[in-house]
Amino acid sequence: MTELSLEGMALAPGVVETIVSIAVGEVDGVASVGPSSASGLRSVFASKPSTQGIEVAVGEDDKLEVSVRIDVCQGYVLPELAANVRKAVADAVASQVGVTVGSVDVYIDGIQFDR
């Protein structure tokens, strides 16, 4: 994503993706955001949330279009979990950036099982 300009405010690339990553990571049942390989050692040493697996684009109607790839924990109802992710992303972006989210596409790439 390139710089996002809104009513006298410019956001650097990665700012909205970070907000989305934090919001998704707080949803109960989400095991990891982005590719599973990104959640290993890198997440232990990273100082900020990974934005891999998150794409943000501005639609024709100036609403944001977000897609997010996640792994989920076993035992959750997937349509409900996806709905919770969509709501968390829309609420976080609206409250922190002041922009309406037009769509949130949720891709469930894997399920993590308790051992």
Image (tube, rainbow, N blue to C red):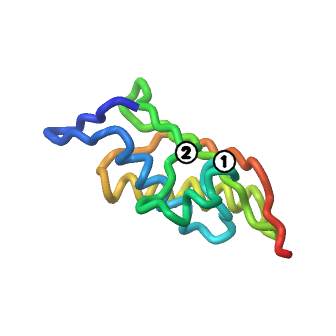
Crowding around mark 2 (Cα neighbors within 10 Å: few <14, some 14 to 19, many 20+) is some
Q: Which residue is mark 2?
A: 52
As drawn, the label of residue 35 is 1
Q: Quadrant of residue 54?
A: top right
The residue located at (55%, 66%) in the rendering is 44
Is 13 drawn above or below residue 30 in the view shown? above
Residue 61 % position (x, y): 39, 28
Comes first in the chain, label 1 or label 2: 1
Query: Which residue is pictured at 68% across the width and 50% down the height?
Result: 37
Seen as rendered, the residue at the extreme left is 8
| Furthest-top residue in this view | 60
- In front of the other: 49 or 88: 49
Nearest to the observer: residue 5 or residue 12: 12
The reply to whether dot 1 and dot 2 touch (C-beta < 8 Å) is yes
Direction from residue 13 to residue 83 in the image, left or right: right
Name which residue type carries label 1. Pro
Q: Quadrant of the C terminus?
A: bottom right
Query: In the drawing, does residue 6 fall left or right of residue 101?
Result: left
Q: Position of residue 23 (x, y in %)?
A: 49, 61
Q: Disc 2 residue type?
A: Gln
Helix, strand or loop under label 1: loop
Q: Secondary structure at mark 2?
A: loop
Q: Position of residue 74 (x, y in %)?
A: 81, 67
Q: Residue at x 27, y 42 (%)?
A: 11
Q: Nearer the viewer, residue 3 or 57?
A: 3
Report the Cα–Cα distance between label 1 and label 2.
7 Å
